[in-house]
Image (tube, grey):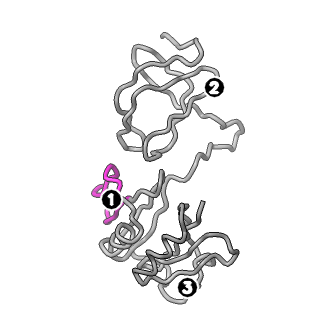
Amino acid sequence: MAYFLTSSPTFPLPNKIIYHGEKIPLTTLSVSTSSPSILRRDRGYGKCSVSRATSIENDVIQKDAHGVDEKDDFGVVGMHHVGILCENLERSLDFYQNILGLEINEARPHDKLPYRGAWLWVGSEMIHLMELPNPDPSTGRPEHGGRDRHTCIAIRDVSKLKDILDRAGIPYTLSRSGRPAIFTRDPDTNALEFTQV
C-alpha cells in the first residue's frame, strides 16, 4: 500500500464526504504526515482533522485523533448542537426563524425520529428543536434567564437584537454584570442568552 511520505502533499478528493450523516462538499485537502491539517467548511460545518491518506489508489482519509494523548482524553473539539424541547413546532419555528432569523439545516433528517423536530443553524453549530413533552415547569422560573438552565448564542450586536425583541413585544433582561448580553425566553420558556463577541 502506498503511503504519503513527503510533507504536505495536496491531492484531489471526491467532491463530497459523509460526516455525521451529512454530505460535505470538498475540493482539495492538504495532508501532512507530521502535523495534521484542519479542514474548515463553509457555514462552519465543523472540523475534520486529517493526518495522512492511507492510499493514493483509494483516496481514503483517516481521521487523526489529534490532541488525544492521555488515556481519559477523548478529544472534545466543540459543541455540535443543543437540544431544545418545544410543545408546538410551528410556534417555535416562528420564533426561531422569524424573530431570531435562524435558518433550517435541510441536510439534517426530519423524518427519521419518532417525534417532530427541526435543525436550525446557529453559526457553525445547531439547535435541534424537538416537539416532545417538557418535564420543566413553564411557571415559577427565574425572571433572569442567567439564573436558569440556558443556551448561550454568540452575536455581533446586542443592541440590534434588543430592538428586534422590543418590536416583537418579547420580554428580556440585560446581563447583570454589565457586559453586552441579553437574556430572553422562547415560547416554551427555554432560557436563551445572547452575548456580544
Q: Which residue is disc 3 drawn over?
A: 141
- Name the quarter where the C terminus is drawn: bottom right
Report if the CB atoms under discs 3 and 1 are less than 8 Å apart: no
Comparing labels 2 and 3, the label whose residue is closer to the camera: 2
Q: Earlier in the sequence, mark 2 or mark 1?
A: 2
Q: Label 1, secondary structure: give it.
A: loop
Residue at 49%, 84% in the rendered image: 171
Q: Label 3, secondary structure: give it.
A: loop
Q: Position of residue 10 (x, y in %)?
A: 48, 19
89 relative position to 31: left or right: left
Q: In the image, is residue 106 part of the stretch drawn in magenta?
A: yes
Q: Looking at this view, is 155 or 44 the one in front? A: 155
In three-dimensional space, the C-alpha distance between marks 2 and 3, rounded to whole angstroms, equals 49 Å
Picture quadrant of residue 85:
bottom left
Magenta span: chief secondary structure: loop
- Indicate whether 60 appears above or below 111: above
In three-dimensional space, the C-alpha distance between marks 3 and 1, rounded to whole angstroms, equals 30 Å
Q: Which residue is disc 2 drawn over?
A: 35
Q: In the image, is residue 128 part of the stretch drawn in magenta?
A: no
Q: Position of residue 131 (x, y in %)?
A: 35, 70
Residue stretch in magenta: 104-119
Report if the CB atoms under discs 2 and 1 are less than 8 Å apart: no
Comparing labels 3 and 1, the label whose residue is closer to the camera: 3
Q: Which residue is disc 1 drawn over?
A: 113
Q: Tag 3: residue type?
A: Arg
In three-dimensional space, the C-alpha distance between marks 2 and 1, rounded to whole angstroms, equals 39 Å
Q: Tag 1: residue type?
A: Leu
Residue at 44%, 18% in the rendered image: 11
Q: Looking at this view, is 127 or 113 the one in front? A: 127
Picture quadrant of residue 22:
top left
Q: Tag 2: residue type?
A: Ser
